[in-house]
Amino acid sequence: MPPKSATARKTNPKKNRLTRSVSFATTAHEFPLASLVYPLRSNASQWLIVPVVLMVAFLFRWAVGLGPYSGMKAPPMHGDFEAQRHWMEVTTQLPVKVWYWHDLDWWGLDYPPLTAYHSWLVGVIGNRIDPNWFALHKSRGLDDEHLKTFMRATVAVSEYLTYVPGVVIFVRNYGKQMSTYDRSIALAAILMQPALMLIDHGHFQYNAVMLGFTILAVDCFITGHVLWGSFFFVLSLCFKQMALYYAPVVFAYLLGVCVFPRIDIRRLFFIGAVTVATFALMFAPLVVSGGFEQLGQCLFRVFPFARGLWEDKVANFWCATNVVVKYKELFASTTLQRVSLLMTLVGILPPCIIIFLYPRKQLLPLGLSACAWSFFMFSFQVHEKSVLLPLMPATLLLAGSLGEDTVSWVTWMNNVAIFSMWPLLRRDGLALQYTVMTLFSAWLMGTFHCLPKHWFAKLTHIGSYAAIIALHAAELVVGKVERLPDLWVVGNVVVCFGCFTIAWAWLLNRLWTESQEKSKTE
């Protein structure tokens, strides 16, 4: 039989085709985090990215949690750890009708009902492990290593059920125009944000649950599921009242999508119905068990205006300018409430107007962050930890762009925000965790390699870093000044407030610029 000719040979084009598992068009960014993710850029390894990032993020959270917590072995009142434990005690050992009335002098419940339900669920699980952890009255101030491990675990599990899925979905949907490699970097950068780790897993709180519900709401808005988005945002509000920092922009966005390009009364009605129904569902157990008096007590506890303009020094307008003007001595509390309300309304108007007139999905992180900064800087009764609210949507901007300008500004905001919480973290005994996480995060995002190009922005970033280093060095070398015991705290407040004001202005400028660019292309 004669040999087959070359043209007669059957070939398998799939077998002979050269396959390429790596996209050589993908280049590494300059900051170290991008280099660490770079080996996973191949098509064969991309399925590993999310599991690896989630595992690494969990290990850092657990490592931070190995340190002390708020009020650890610090009688008589202890701290936030005891507050959270006590709420689990109250909600599991007492009927619903007395939750917001029971012994208010000992960490009385002062968060909306979803926090109470979450405390109840965690308390039920904890009681099955060790009933002594939440024994009524007998467990107050309990500092037990097994209890600490359990409580730390509940923070991690709660975060991985709400915040982490929200971030993963957000990065996937918001960054569709980015490569898989760039989205992987953004996911790692967002989940490795040190401020949230230090507060939730170090100081001890459940802020990630509130932030997670907000991100899930934004995810729904981005994918066009506005009713589900409304539902999740109400859950955020019902978990912690600080989610009100986002509420004006969320309202403006939802109203905008119901008005532009044409008025949609049906959509507006259903959004309102879902919002009211969700609030009713959350507060129903309180009303059924204790009537509207219980509802009124809950609202009174949630909005503690009687505490005054502020409790601890925080990097906002009031504390920063109090160096010159002693507000508490010169003005009545009601006057300060009204002025604070007016200044907050003026601050939130620009982002709300822009989002209403240009209800674009891509503008949501900018609008949410700018609005939250306005609340943080001007509103009544602000805590240091509230800086997490404007910081979260600002960090989410990395999912849309890893350009030098975005990376440098987001990294700078994170670095300054961590420093603003230094007095709180030092008081909790978390100096080691603060130092390691601050330096590691600064290195990871290439703080001194990714500076903005504009001379004023570059000067601002370098100048603020120099001020932070100088204040830390002075505090370390000089120590406490007897005649001025709050000197270093006040220095922290003034420097951070100046930086936050600039960050707020940058966000507003970018929000306006991008809204105009998008409107021209549509």
Image (spheres, rainbow, N blue to C red):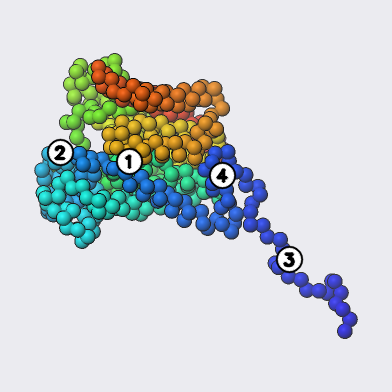
Q: Residue at x 25, y 51 (%)?
A: 145
Where residue 236 appears, as percent x and y from the top left, is 31, 46
Label 3 is placed on what type of residue?
Asn
- The local crowd at label 3, few if under 14, some if 14 to 19, many if 20 or more residues have their Cα within 10 Å, is few
**Residue corresponding to mark 3:** 16
- How far is mark 4 from mark 1, CA to CA? 28 Å
**Marks 2 and 1, the one that precedes in the sequence:** 2
Quadrant assignment for the C terminus: top right
**Residue corresponding to mark 2:** 76
**Residue corresponding to mark 4:** 35
- How far is mark 2 from mark 1, CA to CA? 22 Å
**Residue corresponding to mark 1:** 199
- The local crowd at label 4, few if under 14, some if 14 to 19, many if 20 or more residues have their Cα within 10 Å, is some
Q: Nearer the viewer, mark 4 or mark 2?
A: 2
Label 2 is placed on what type of residue?
Pro
- How far is mark 4 from mark 2, CA to CA? 48 Å
